[in-house]
Image (spheres, rainbow, N blue to C red):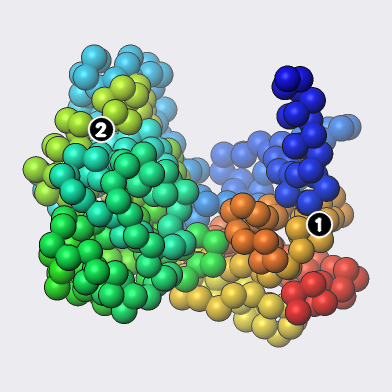
Amino acid sequence: MDFNAHFATQLEALKAEGNYRIFADLERRCGAFPQAGCHREGGVENVTVWCSNDYLGMGQNPEVVQAMVETVQACGTGAGGTRNISGNTVHHLALEAELADLHGKEKALLFTSGYVSNWAALSTLGAKIPGAVILSDEKNHASMIEGIRHSRADKALWKHNDWRDLDRKLHAVGDRPKIVAFESVYSMDGDVAPIREIIEVCEAHGALSYIDEVHAVGMYGPRGGGVSEELGLADRIDVIEGTLGKAFGVVGGYITGSAALVDFVRSYASGFIFTTALPPAVAAAATASIRHLKTSTAERSAQKARVAEVRARLDRAGIPHLANESHIIPVMIGDPVKCRMLSDILMRDWGIYVQPINYPTVPKGTERLRITPGPAHSTADIDHLMTALTSLWSRCAVSHAVA
């Protein structure tokens, strides 16, 4: 077989469909977020980033930066291996204690990313609980799907955010051990799960509840504990999973839960045991970010104000976006080629970076620009964004694609 010819053919098919992914060559500038440098032929141009998952700009918060720099100077750059081989550091232990406190749980366990924490935790729970069935929301993230698949446990899908369908599916499972996996904020549509109803159904059936709060931690609740904290439900959820790479502005993932459950995952999860630990400096920076957001509401308040302003301006301009309760604003395009084209024009002509979201991240026909306003976006930034979008909307006849 001519492998390279096969690869090239498949890539050309992706390009023809408009689903080939092109990554912007960006350089984040400390202290300037959401401004960044875009490297192109002929030099570096300034762009405004409108699609970052660094939702609150904490990746450039002076306290967080200082904590990382000081720890690098004190400890060096890497962890030296897995925690089994190189041992725990005081920075890993301090971060896990901070995370357990954030969610009101007995223990927390760090992973190298939010993807890995979902994959490792769900695969371990599904594989190591005899006879377990995992009931998964049909729109769960790829990391959850992969973890469930890897566990080889029986699974059942329930309709997105439909707790009544979940109840029916749990009834059908009977007396077997049951794990219910779902998210709080879904990253592409920005919708929020009916967490209270889901938890009540789980409790009625004796199911273990597992919530992914990666797009909510730092963002919601009086201390940034996520939607479950905001609703006062964290204590009723068995496993709360989150990330350090979005609102907390660093990198890494984690789970929190009872001491027995967390130790169980720590002892059996290959994705924890055999992976090099996060660098101590990353752990120290994440700890500083969490501590800051536990007491500061300024970032969350400013971010909510920017989101409300952008939504109102889009409504006045007649630009369709999905209504939801979260900070994520999906501007619907409905065509992959047009979505890519709009993103390219915004970058080239307007200095605005909004990455197109195409299949397989979202279903075909629902392609979109995913906008995430942050506290550092100025009124002038919003004016510029709206001028650009309004101009392109009529120029490119986007409304026909959406309809």
Q: Residue 337, located in which quarter of the rendered image?
A: bottom right
SS at badge 2: loop
Q: Can residue 331 be seen by looking at this rendering? A: yes
Q: Is residue 387 visible?
A: no
* Amino acid type for the residue under numbered disc 1: Val
Q: Is residue 255 left or right of residue 364?
A: left
The quarter in which the C terminus is drawn is: bottom right
Residue drawn at x 33%, y 14% is 80
Q: Position of residue 219 (x, y in %)?
A: 39, 61
Ranked by sequence position, the earlier of labels 1 and 2 is: 2
Q: Is residue 14 left or right of residue 154?
A: right
Residue with the mark numbered 1: 337
Residue drawn at point x = 41 percent, y = 27 percent: 69
Up-down relation of residue 105 to residue 151 (above or below): below
Residue 269: mark in rendering: 2
Q: Nearer the viewer, residue 304 or 330?
A: 330
Question: In the picture, which quadrant includes the N terminus?
Answer: top right
- Kindly indicate whether the residue at mark 2 contacts the one at mark 1 (C-beta within 8 angstroms): no
Residues packed near mark 1 inside 10 Å, few (<14), some (14 to 19) or many (20 plus): some
Instruction: Quadrant for residue 374, please give it.
Output: bottom right
| Residue 330, above or below 273 | below
Q: Classify mark 2: residues with Cα within 10 Å, few (<14), some (14-19) or many (20+).
A: many
Q: Amino acid at mark 2?
A: Ala
**Left or right for 283, reference 257:** right
Residue placed at 14% from the left, 73% from the top? Answer: 204
Q: Position of residue 358 (x, y in %)?
A: 67, 55
Which residue of the protein is positioned furthest toward the left in this rendering? 260
